[in-house]
Image (cartoon, rainbow, N blue to C red):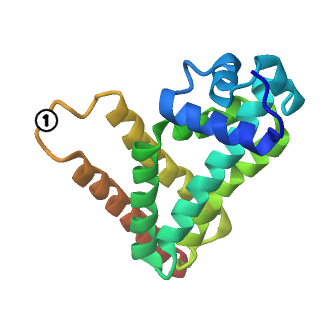
Amino acid sequence: MSRRGLTRAEVVRAATELIEDEGTGGFSLRGLARKLHVKASSLYNHISGMDELFTEVGYYAIGELKRTQLAAIEGKRRDDAVLALAEAYYRFGKERPELYKVILSLPMVKNDALLSAAGDIVEPIMAAMDGYSLSGADKMHLQRVLRSIMHGFISQEEAGCFRHFPVEISESYRMAVRGFILLLDDLENEASE
């Protein structure tokens, strides 16, 4: 059951695939070793343990979310950028739910480098708001509000909280984002007075 030439990158890639396919709850180093056709003890030649492996998967997940958001807002400004970013975030959370869960677990990890990388999630949101004349502090508050709206919808929908009424959930989401854009406009108008 040995495999020559296994690399750290292959271990992380296989772990990411396993997490996306089977979820974080059932993930184990034994399962990862089976997938890679190696003994579980061989994995320790490439990683120190589960915390380090989840850190690496976390880096990957953050990078994927960031790339998704930046691609969505490319060439867009103001309202169009915010709407596109919110749609991309929602789609990522729905289409890649296990990686999204890894991202959400990052604040609980005691790893300064990874927490710093989590700032990459904020970067596209701040870029989407660049077209608005707002202070840096206002933008920081507003990115928190937008992230709360986006995550709130994903988590509420995932929990089944929106099934009880026969209206389209995605339309409710768009309404919330449009409400956020009205807040952006209001704050920008206040700042210019």
Q: Is residue 31 something that shows in the picture?
A: yes
Compared with residue 37, is residue 154 higher up or lower down, i.e. above or below? below
> Does 15 appear above or below 81?
above
Q: Residue at x 39, y 66 (%)?
A: 83
> In the rendered image of this protein, does residue 24 appear above or below residue 133?
above
Q: Residues within 10 Å of mark 1 (few under 14, many from 20)?
A: few
- Residue 141 sits above or below residue 35 on the image: below
Place residue 101 in its image quadrant.
top right
Which residue shows up at 52% across the image and 81% down it?
192
Residue bearing mark 1: 165
Q: Quadrant of residue 166?
A: top left
Viewer-closest of 18 and 144? 18
Viewer-side residue, 12 vs 74: 12
Compared across the picture, whether 5 is left or right of 84 comes to right
Q: Among all residues in the image, which is located at the extreme left?
A: 166
Q: Residue 9 location, x and y as percent?
A: 76, 45
Residue drawn at the location 24% of the way across and 34% of the way down: 162
